[in-house]
Structures are given as structure tokens and as C-alpha cells.
Image: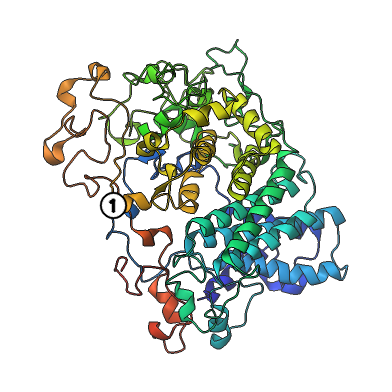
């Protein structure tokens, strides 16, 4: 239910720009400066670099087949992920803040009562429509069906219970797209601040393509199940308000087509306006060598000069707005590393997969060897022992400086311990000053234009089962920039999806292997967006975890039990000693398995999946709040597929 006390508290927090005694709603949100201040505070919901260890955007792909943290995720342990009594994603606080702005400002805007720059006023309105859409997309991903609340509501229990009715997920997605269309209409072509730190029209169009592609592919791969409206077992059908639901387009197939069309048109509009940043394919080793713009795009202080970057967040030591990304990249990634499955998935530079006899792949006997002749994105963004982490040394020194990349430390403990042996370097700054007790201040990319290229390619193929000239041009541009033979048809012809499947959950949808072209599109997305937080979203919308319901997946790192064994003191590599073990046993795999060191690990026998885990359960308190009597069985809301309405219980 709507947490109204929290709503009221948050509104006061945002309104507190004057002495409380003189502040009333009628005296606020009347000019462009006030609109700007209110809107910019709402940006915090957008993921960005963090000043907390393990919370940075570059490690958001952990707990997938791309990256592994030192601790596993309970979602891959059926029975450990349970319904809560309180909390969860059923929350309206951020939506309230957006609604308060919109319902207050829009009547004043239409009546011409707002003062200040007309252009600025429109931009700030566009920002809030965008941010309401962004908040709703987080709800769509977490919960699926969700109430659409356009205005703030009175403290009337009956009114609030009525407003708690869940709208079918496709209606939520349509609402998000409508808000993004409004945002695009109000926002300027370029960021109003002139630097790219505030939203612009292309951000709205790019995000629209993301939302539309997400919903289209979700509906396609979950079609007919309880996870889509009118599917078998859909819990919404048990409620009077949804049991006679009719799709706006007439059918689920019509909805899929609608969302794909939206993704195609909006992504093309952005892609055609964006120039991809140049990749020189070089690794900078000294200050006298020119930097590589592609690598520096993720680690520069000022990102305003990169056309590909549509929105970024600036940081400042002076203002105490700092983060940990450079420190983590210069060191060990804060106990998060790339998986063997991800590393093996990168093509050779000639466009062939590593298992092809003609690929020229040298093997994985060492970290240095595994990157030779590969897709340049792997070399750019994965560390190799001997790589330079710091080129600019500061007289003040740094707390945890590691100028030269060392051999992976598997038993050092703490933040300096490697998780998989394969360590990312995306976001690495060569400046030692970025590594002084977490005071990093490099810019953080929020949206970059290459996503539009990728979204168009995938959406067009999903709609037409072919590649048109536009998609062909985008795909070749991505591969050429990435350091891979641009002839993607060569890759498709050499791809055996059954050989890719052991390393890539994205080889599946609904437990079935996909075709080689679609797989190659998904691979391109996986490799281009390395360490950028897209992976779980993509795997979820593709329904790419079903295979783990019956076949456990083993997260692996580098080939510890091979020639690299000589890097370590055998006495330190304790295995097969129960809870005293430091590394996984060679009898389990020649590859290091970070979650299989001790038999007491809940994932000792691999990651498993439960279909219900694709959506979060709604906490029990919300069912009680949305019932006139507090009885969960009479609640106006319904639970997500497979989940009970019992605190502490796992899926049915």
C-alpha cells in the first residue's frame, strides 16, 4: 500500500528550501530555479558510481554468468529466497515525489504562471516525466504488474485500496513509454547544462527503446505463462478488476509487435545521431604514449567531449562527491571478477569463436595467453599480470596503490582478494590520486549511444527474423570499433550454439537453445556492455535461466590447476579440507570455482533456479494494508506467480 507518512516526509524534505514557517505549496515550484532544484534531487534513483565498497556500477553484473562476487546470491539457491513480512519493491516514495511535482507544476505551466526561462522550465518538466518513467521501469522489472498512480492521493483507506489494484505489465510498460514520449517532447536536443550532466531528448528516446525492447522480449519468451497477462495461471485473472482484461492491440502478439516497433523507431533516432568513440586498440603504457579514447571514455574526469556519452554524472573531491570505481579497478575489483564463461565467450579478432579449429586461439593456460588475438574489448577491459595500473604518481601517495598488476591473489583475504582470477579494468584511471581512500572523481556514464545500436539490431531481428541494411551498418560499426572482423556472417556461420551454451546463459530462452544469428546478437551485446550492469536485465527478459531448474551451473574462473599453479605456494592452496579449504578442489574442475571451496557451501553443487525467481515476491504487509480488514485473502492485490503470501516461505 502507499506509505503515506513516508510520502509526506519526503515531500517536506524536498520543499525545505525556505524556512518551514514561511513555506507552503503555494509558495514553491513557481520558477525555473525551484523546478531545477527539485528535479535534480530526483536523479539519485539512476545507478551511478558509489562511495561504498562493492556497490559500484562496474560490479552490478555480479551474480550472473558474467561476473562473480566473493559471496553468492541466494536467488540461485531455491528455498533460500523467501517472502518477507515487510519492505521490498512495493514502494511508492519516489513515484510520489514525481507525482507531486507533475500535479503541482503542470497546471501552472499550462496557465503560464511559472516564471523564468521558458526553455529551462520545459526541460525540468521533461526531466521529471523521465524520472517517473525510470522509477516505474524499476517496478516493472521487479514486480511486473503494478498500480499506475498518476496523482497523489488523499488519506482515505478506501481510495488507497482502490488505487492499489495492479495494472497488467504491458499497461505499465505503455504508461512508461507515454511518460517518455512526454519527456522527449519537453526536453531539449542537448543537455541544458551544456556538459551532459542533465537529461536531454536522446536520453528519453534511448530509454524508451530499452523499456520497449525489455517488454517485447519478456512477453515473447514468457508468452502463455503466468508471467504475462491472460497467460495460463496468470494471478491477475483471479481478481474481478483484471479477469476480463483485453489487450489494447487485441492480443499478446499484437503487444509484442507494438513494443518492438517502439524499440526500433526510438533506437534508430538515437543511433543516427551518435558517433561511436574511437578505439585505437592500444593499451597505454607510458605518459608519452597517446591515450585510447575508447578506454578513457570510462575513466576520464570530464566526459563532455564524448559524443557517444548521452548522460554522465560528474564528481568532485572539493564538494566531497566521490566514488570508489578507480580504486577498485586499480586494485582487485573489490572481490568481484569476470567468469571463465564470459572470457571464453569473446570472439577472436578474426571473428571466429575460440572452439573453431581455424580460430588461432592459444588456450587459457595463463591469463596473458587468453587475451592474445582476441576481441579487443576483452584486452581493453580485463587485466593481465604486468599491466600498468598507475602512470601518474602523486607526492601525497595513496592508501592501496598497486602500480603493476600482480598475479591473482586467491588467499590474501579482504578487499585485496581476487574472486575468479580474471579481473576487470573498466573504469581504471592511471592517476594515483584517484586511489586515496576512495576519493575517485572520474565521470560515470549513465547512458551511451551504442546501446541504441544494439537495441535496434536485436529489436529488428526479433520482429523480422532478418537483418536489414540499418542493422547491418550498426553491427559492423560496433564490431569494427571493438576490434573484431566486422563480417558478422562469418561468425554466425561458425557458431555452434550448443558449444556456447555451457558458458552463456543467453544461449537459451525458456530452456531451449536459440538460433545462431540471435545468439550472435546477444553475444555482441554481452561483450560490448561488459561491466555496465545490463546482464541480469537481459537474462531476465530473455527468460535465460530456465535451464538451471534441472541442470546446475558452475561459476568458474581461471585455470588454476594448470601451468598457472606455479604462480602460487602449494602450501597456501588448501583444498579438500572442509571449511578450512581456501580454493576449490582440482577433482571438481581444473578451473577455479569460487563458490565450491567447501562442501558446506549452499551452492557447492552449482547454481540452480526456480521459475518464480524471475519476479520478486510482494511482502505480506502490503497485502494486509490493501485489505479493509487486514486479511491477506481479501486483499485487492495479488501475489506474483509461484510465491505464497506467507512470510518466511519460499516459492510454492
User: Residue 305 vs residue 514: left or right?
Assistant: right
Pick the residue in front: 559 or 257. 257
Seen in the picture, residue 243 relative to 211 is either above or below; the reply is below
Residue under numbered circle 1: 550
Q: Is residue 278 left or right of residue 578?
A: right
**In which quadrant of the rendered view does residue 242 lie?**
bottom right
Residue 505 lies, in percent from the top left, at: 40, 43
Q: Residue at x 66, y 24 (%)?
A: 278
At x 63%, y 45%, the residue is 460
Disc 1 element = loop
Q: In the drawing, does residue 49 fall left or right of residue 276?
A: left
Residue 508 relative to residue 272: left or right: left
Q: Quadrant of residue 97?
A: bottom right
Up the image or down, 310 lies above or below 24; here it is above
The quarter holding residue 402 reads top left
* Residue furthest left as drawn: 577
Residue plotted at (76% across, 67% down):
105
Residue found 86% across the figure and 62% down from its top: 115
User: Residue 125: x and y, percent?
Assistant: 75, 60
Amino acid at each position: 500500500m502507499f506509505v503515506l507518512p513516508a510520502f509526506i516526509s519526503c515531500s517536506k524534505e524536498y520543499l525545505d528550501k525556505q524556512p518551514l514557517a514561511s513555506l507552503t505549496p503555494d509558495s514553491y515550484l513557481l520558477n525555473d530555479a525551484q523546478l531545477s532544484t527539485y528535479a535534480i534531487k530526483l536523479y539519485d534513483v539512476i545507478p551511478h558510481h558509489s562511495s561504498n565498497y562493492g556497490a559500484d556500477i562496474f560490479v552490478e553484473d555480479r551474480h550472473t554468468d558474467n561476473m562473480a562476487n566473493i559471496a553468492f546470491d541466494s536467488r540461485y539457491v531455491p528455498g533460500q529466497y523467501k517472502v518477507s513480512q515487510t519492505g521490498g519493491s512495493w514502494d511508492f516514495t519516489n513515484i510520489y515525489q514525481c507525482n507531486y511535482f507533475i500535479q503541482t507544476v503542470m497546471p501552472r505551466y499550462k496557465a503560464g504562471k511559472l516564471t523564468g526561462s521558458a526553455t529551462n522550465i520545459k526541460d525540468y518538466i521533461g526531466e521529471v516525466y523521465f524520472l517517473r518513467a525510470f522509477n516505474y521501469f524499476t517496478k516493472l522489472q521487479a514486480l511486473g504488474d503494478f498500480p499506475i498512480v498518476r496523482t497523489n492521493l488523499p488519506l482515505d483507506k478506501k481510495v488507497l485500496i482502490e488505487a492499489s489494484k495492479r495494472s497488467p505489465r504491458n499497461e505499465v510498460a505503455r504508461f512508461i513509454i507515454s511518460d517518455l514520449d512526454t519527456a522527449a517532447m519537453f526536453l531539449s536536443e542537448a543537455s541544458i547544462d551544456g556538459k551532459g550532466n542533465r537529461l536531454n531528448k536522446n536520453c528519453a528516446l534511448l530509454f524508451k527503446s530499452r523499456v520497449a525492447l525489455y517488454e517485447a522480449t519478456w512477453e515473447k519468451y514468457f508468452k502463455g505463462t503466468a508471467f504475462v497477462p491472460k497467460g495460463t495461471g496468470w494471478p491477475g485473472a483471479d481478481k474481478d478488476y483484471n479477469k476480463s482484461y483485453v489487450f489494447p492491440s487485441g492480443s499478446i502478439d499484437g503487444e509484442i509487435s507494438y513494443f518492438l516497433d517502439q524499440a526500433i523507431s526510438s533506437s534508430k533516432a538515437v543511433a543516427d545521431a551518435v558517433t561511436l568513440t574511437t578505439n585505437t586498440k592500444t593499451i597505454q603504457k607510458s605518459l608519452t604514449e597517446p591515450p585510447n579514447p575508447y578506454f578513457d571514455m570510462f575513466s576520464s574526469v570530464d566526459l563532455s567531449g564524448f559524443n557517444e556519452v548521452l548522460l554522465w554524472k560528474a564528481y568532485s573531491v572539493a564538494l566531497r562527491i566521490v566514488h570508489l570505481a578507480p580504486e577498485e579497478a586499480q586494485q582487485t575489483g573489490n572481490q568481484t571478477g569476470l567468469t571463465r564463461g564470459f572470457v571464453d565467450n569473446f570472439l577472436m579478432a578474426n571473428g571466429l569463436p575460440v572452439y573453431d579449429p581455424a580460430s588461432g586461439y592459444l588456450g587459457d593456460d595463463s591469463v596473458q595467453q587468453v587475451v592474445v588475438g582476441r576481441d579487443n574489448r576483452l584486452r581493453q577491459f580485463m587485466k593481465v599480470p604486468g599491466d600498468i595500473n598507475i602512470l601518474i604518481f602523486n607526492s601525497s601517495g595513496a592508501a592501496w596503490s598497486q602500480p603493476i598488476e600482480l598475479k591473482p591473489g586467491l588467499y590474501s583475504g579482504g578487499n585485496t582478494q581476487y574472486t575468479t582470477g580474471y579481473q576487470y579494468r573498466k573504469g581504471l584511471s592511471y592517476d594515483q590520486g584517484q586511489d586515496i581512500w576512495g576519493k575517485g572523481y572520474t565521470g560515470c556514464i549513465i547512458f551511451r549511444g551504442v546501446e541504441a545500436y544494439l537495441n535496434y539490431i536485436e529489436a529488428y531481428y526479433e520482429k523480422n527474423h532478418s537483418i536489414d541494411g540499418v542493422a547491418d551498418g550498426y553491427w559492423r560499426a560496433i564490431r569494427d570499433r571493438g576490434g573484431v572482423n566486422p563480417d558478422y556472417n562469418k561468425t554466425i556461420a561458425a557458431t555452434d550454439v550448443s558449444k556456447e551454451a555451457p558458458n552463456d546463459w543467453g544461449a537459451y530462452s525458456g530452456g531451449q537453445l536459440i538460433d545462431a544469428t540471435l545468439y550472435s546478437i546477444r553475444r555482441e551485446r554481452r561483450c560490448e556492455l561488459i561491466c555496465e550492469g545490463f546482464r541480469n536485465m537481459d537474462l531476465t527478459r530473455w527468460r535465460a535461466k530456465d535451464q538451471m531448474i534441472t541442470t546446475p551451473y558452475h561459476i568458474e574462473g581461471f585455470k588454476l590447476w594448470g601451468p598457472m599453479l606455479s604462480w602460487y605456494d602449494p602450501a597456501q592452496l588448501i583444498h579438500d579440507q572442509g571449511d578450512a579449504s581456501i580454493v576449490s578442489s582440482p577433482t571438481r574442475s581444473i578451473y577455479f570455482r569460487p563458490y565450491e571451496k567447501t562442501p558446506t557451501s549452499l551452492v557447492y553443487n552449482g547454481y540452480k533456479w526456480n521459475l518464480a525467481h524471475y519476479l520478486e515476491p510482494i511482502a505480506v504487509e502490503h497485502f494486509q494494508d490493501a485489505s479493509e480488514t487486514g486479511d491477506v485473502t481479501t486483499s485487492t492485490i495479488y501475489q506474483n506467480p509461484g510465491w505464497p503470501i506467507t512470510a518466511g516461505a519460499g516459492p510454492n
